[in-house]
Structures are given as structure tokens and as C-alpha cells.
Image (cartoon, rainbow, N blue to C red):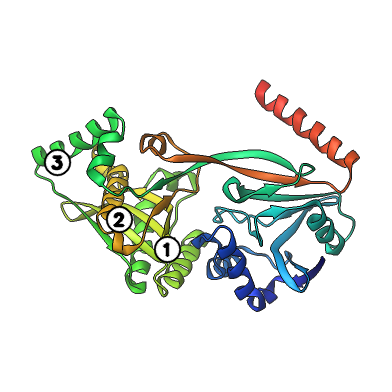
């Protein structure tokens, strides 16, 4: 096993290898090479390191790293990346693998952290520490929507029915629209930004707009993936007006809802939730489209659980080259956890 160091600009030479590793493990749209290239274009500084590891001349690991302290390196984690930007050939993370990575990273290495790993694909050796990050969820598309609707909580069913009854009383109508063509998807991202720019997120400075870095990334990424039918934008409309928008990417039967926003003037209808229900119904009733699973890849919310979603941890991994450093790292983590619990 041998590791090699490259400039990030050389990622284009490894896109086929990257996609192969993704297909062997996660097989998710958020870890395809074109998604990653958009992240590089909009969020990387040029100081990051690209590491490629080969075993018997076969690539078994590719990842991006950045230095974060004295002897400390971590996988690059842009805010718009739902999972860490690193892949192994079989989901295994071994001491020998990280030891070889440490040998090629500049300077001495005391610790390597692999951030935001999906526990569903992990196979770890005991000397690699697993630290909790968030719990996320996914919803398998049911074969029969009506049967699924009966299984969700009574309160959720009542809330959905109340929204439709209220719309009827107020003379409103509900509909949905899914945009899949590249130009339409781009227009959908712009519409998303218009709605979010008028929401509470704008006050906090976290909203997507047509001109900020987030907006530019999503416009470029969604339009790029839409060119190969790997992105779509969902609208929930109230009497023809867009009340909620979901930005989604798709790969091999798995759709990921990346971002959700809604027009607060329609909040009485809970349009973002109704959009999820209609999305589930749409893919349930059209199995020929091939979407079998809906991923959230964000912190599991109450409504995720109310949809009977499957939940699992997203974790950070931490590795040190010897037992003394591992002991010190565990002591530091325990102290931080205790401090957090006391605050």
C-alpha cells in the first residue's frame, strides 16, 4: 500500500476512479465527481491536499485534506457537502491506510480526522475512534402510498387533512411540479433563492441568494447534474403560487433532498411538509422512474421520524499513529463532552 500527494487541480485526472469508489460504497449523488468538482470550484482555497492511495496498483482511497493545527489534519468539509470528501474501495478504514496517508502529508502528523462519515458504509478497526455527530434519516419509497399513509402518526395524518380542508374553505388549490430540464432546474434554484431571501434565514445571513457563494454553487451544481438527469427541483404551489421548494439530486434510485424552503405567507398550510408527502406519493405511484429511496442527509427532525424514516448516525472518525496519542485524544474528547454536558 502506498499513498501519493497531488494538488487539488489534478482531481480531474481521478474523476473516473473517484466515481468507481463511490459506486462501490455510497453510490450517492452528493459523492459523484461532478458534485465534488463544483465544491472545489466554489469553496476550496487551493491550500488543500489531494491524497490517493493504491494497493497492488489499484486505487483504494481518494480524499481531500487540510491542516487544522499542529500536526493535525482533517478531511475537507465545505458547508454544502453533506458527507466528508473521502472514499475507500470497500468502506473499510484501517490503521495501515491512515498510516500511509500520514507519511505523505506535509510535516509531522499527530492526528487525522475523517469528518461526517455515513455509518451505513463504515467498517472500522478498533484503534480508530468514532465520535457522534448527528442522526440522519432516509425514507424508502412505499409500494402503496395509501397503505403508507395509514401507518404514519395520527397527528400527522390529521394535519395533512386539515391543510386540505382549510384550502378548500379559503378557495385555494394545491398542486406540485417537478422540474428536470437543466434550464428549468436553474430557474428553480433562482426561485428558491428568491423565497429564502425573504425568510428568517435572510436575517441570519444564511439564506441562498442569486448572488452569494451559496447561490452560485447551487446554480452551477444543480444545472451540471441536471444535464445527466441527476438533479430536479420540486415545487409545491398554492393556487398557482410557489409556496415551497425542494432542491434534489438523484443517483441510482436514491433521491437526496439537499435544501428546503417555503414562503412564510403560506405557513398555515405547512407547504414544505405537504411537498414531502406529495413527493413520496409521486414516486410510489410511478415506480418506472426508479426512485426507491429518499435521503435527508441532515439532522433528523421530528417530521422525519413521523414519516417512519429509518434513522442512523453520521459520525466523525479520529486516528492517531500510536497508543499514547490515542489515549490523549480520548481524554481530551471525554473532557470536552463533560464540559458540554455541564454547560
Nearer the observer: mark 2 or 3; the answer is: 2
x%, y% of residue 213?
A: 52, 61
Q: Quadrant of residue 163?
A: top left
Q: What residue is shown with label 1?
A: 210
x%, y% of residue 308?
A: 38, 37
x%, y% of residue 246?
A: 36, 54
x%, y% of residue 323?
A: 88, 40
Q: Residue at x 74, y 58 (%)?
A: 66
Q: Which mark is on residue 283?
A: 2
Q: Mark 3 vs mark 1: which is more N-terminal? A: 3
Spatial separation of the CA atoms under disc 3 and disc 1 = 31 Å
Circle 1 SS class: loop
Asked whether, in this view, residue 211 is left or right of residue 89, the answer is: left
Q: Mark 2 vs mark 3: which is more N-terminal? A: 3
Foreground of the two, 52 or 34: 52
Nearer the observer: mark 3 or 1; the answer is: 3
| Label 1 CA crowd tier, 10 Å (few <14, some 14–19, many 20+) | some
Q: Residue at x 64, y 64 (%)?
A: 44
Spatial separation of the CA atoms under disc 2 and disc 3 = 24 Å
Circle 3 SS class: helix
Residue 343 visible in this rendered orientation of the protein: no
Quadrant housing the C terminus: top right
Q: Residue at x 61, y 56 (%)?
A: 78
Asked whether, in this view, residue 219 is left or right of residue 20, the answer is: left
Q: Residue at x 85, y 36 (%)?
A: 328
Q: Are marks 2 and 3 in contact (CB under 8 Å)?
A: no
Q: What residue is shown with label 3?
A: 167
| Label 2 CA crowd tier, 10 Å (few <14, some 14–19, many 20+) | many
Q: Mark 1 vs mark 2: which is more N-terminal? A: 1
Circle 2 SS class: helix
Nearer the observer: mark 1 or 2; the answer is: 2
Amino acid at each position: 500500500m502506498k499513498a501519493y500527494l497531488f494538488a487539488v487541480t489534478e482531481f480531474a485526472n481521478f474523476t473516473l476512479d473517484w466515481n468507481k469508489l463511490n459506486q462501490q460504497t455510497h453510490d450517492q449523488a452528493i459523492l459523484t465527481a461532478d458534485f465534488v468538482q463544483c465544491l472545489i470550484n466554489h469553496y476550496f482555497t487551493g491550500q488543500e491536499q489531494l491524497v490517493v492511495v493504491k494497493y497492488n496498483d489499484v486505487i483504494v482511497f481518494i480524499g481531500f485534506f487540510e491542516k487544522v493545527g499542529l500536526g493535525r489534519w482533517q478531511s475537507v468539509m465545505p458547508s454544502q457537502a453533506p458527507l466528508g470528501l473521502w472514499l475507500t474501495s470497500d468502506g473499510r478504514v484501517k490503521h495501515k491506510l491512515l498510516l500511509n496517508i500520514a507519511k505523505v502529508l506535509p510535516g509531522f502528523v499527530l492526528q487525522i480526522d475523517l469528518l461526517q462519515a455515513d455509518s451505513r458504509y463504515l467498517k472500522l478497526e478498533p484503534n480508530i475512534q468514532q465520535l457522534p455527530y448527528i442522526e440522519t434519516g432516509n425514507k424508502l419509497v412505499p409500494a402503496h402510498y395509501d397503505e403508507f399513509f395509514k401507518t404514519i402518526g395520527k397527528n400527522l395524518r390529521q394535519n395533512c387533512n386539515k391543510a386540505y380542508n382549510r384550502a378548500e374553505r379559503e378557495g385555494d388549490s394545491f398542486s406540485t411540479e417537478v422540474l428536470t430540464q437543466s434550464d428549468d432546474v436553474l430557474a428553480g434554484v433562482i426561485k428558491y433563492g428568491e423565497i429564502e431571501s425573504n425568510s428568517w434565514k435572510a436575517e441570519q445571513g444564511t439564506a441562498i441568494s442569486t448572488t452569494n457563494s451559496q447561490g452560485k454553487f447551487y446554480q452551477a451544481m444543480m444545472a451540471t447534474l441536471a444535464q445527466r438527469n441527476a438533479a430536479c427541483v420540486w415545487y409545491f404551489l398554492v393556487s398557482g403560487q410557489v409556496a415551497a421548494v425542494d432542491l434534489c439530486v438523484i443517483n441510482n434510485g436514491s433521491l437526496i433532498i439537499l435544501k428546503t424552503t417555503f414562503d412564510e405567507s403560506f405557513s398555515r398550510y405547512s407547504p414544505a411538509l405537504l411537498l414531502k408527502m406529495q413527493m413520496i406519493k409521486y414516486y410510489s405511484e410511478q415506480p418506472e422512474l426508479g426512485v426507491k429511496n429518499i435521503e435527508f442527509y441532515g439532522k433528523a427532525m421530528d417530521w422525519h421520524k413521523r414519516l417512519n424514516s429509518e434513522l442512523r448516525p453520521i459520525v466523525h472518525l479520529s486516528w492517531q499513529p500510536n497508543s499514547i496519542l490515542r489515549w490523549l485524544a480520548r481524554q481530551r474528547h471525554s473532557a470536552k463532552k463533560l464540559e458540554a454536558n455541564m454547560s
